[in-house]
Image (spheres, grey):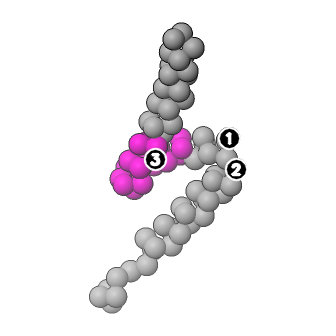
Amino acid sequence: MDALLALVIFTVCLMVPLAVLTWLARLAKRHGTAGAALAGAVAAYDEFYRTTAHQSHYELRVQADRRSEQGSPDDH
């Protein structure tokens, strides 16, 4: 029974930070510039653990900047 309890505690200790980071990433994407600090924190995490995700983060930022610079078709 002690081994099962230790396994459950270990699993919870791994899952809680991952769930919090996932929630923060979704929050940052939803709020755009208001979540820039959170997006930066998630990018730093990605840079350390997953370098390809870090590169993708910068590619997505460039694409978002490109979209925001475009005017609407109604602008003259």
- Residue 56 visible in rendering: yes
Q: Which residues are magenta?
A: 22-42
Residue at 58 percent of width and 47 percent of height: 43
Query: Residue flagged by tag 1: what amino acid is it?
Result: Phe
Question: Could you say whether the residue bearing mark 3 is in a helix, strand or loop?
Answer: helix
Image location (x, y in percent) of residue 64: 48, 67
Query: Is residue 75 part of the magenta span, yes or no?
Result: no
Q: Quadrant of the C terminus?
A: bottom left
Q: Residue, x 34% and y 82% (percent of image)?
A: 72
Question: Looking at the picture, which amino acid does disc 2 mark?
Answer: Thr
Mark before the other along the chain sequence, 2 or 3:
3
Where is residue 29 shown, x and y percent of the image?
42, 54
What label sits on residue 37 in the rendered view?
A: none
How would you classify the magenta stretch by its main secondary structure? helix
Q: Residues within 10 Å of mark 3 (few under 14, many from 20)?
A: some
Picture quadrant where residue 45 is located: top right
- Give percent across and percent down for residue 37: 47, 43
Mark closest to the chain's N terminus, 1 or 3: 3
Residue type at the position of mark 3: Ala
Alpha carbons under labels 1 and 3: distance apart? 16 Å
Magenta segment includes 40: yes
Q: Is residue 52 left or right of residue 20?
A: right
**Label 1 sits on residue:** 48
Q: Residue at x 51, y 11 (%)?
A: 1
Q: Which residue is mark 2?
A: 51
- Cα–Cα span, label 2 and label 3: 17 Å
Mark 2 neighbour class, 10 Å CA radius: few under 14, some 14 to 19, many 20 or more: some
> Is residue 13 something one can see in this rendering?
no
Residue 65 percent across, percent down from the top left: 50, 67
Q: Which residue is mark 3?
A: 25
Secondary structure of the residue carrying tag 1 is helix
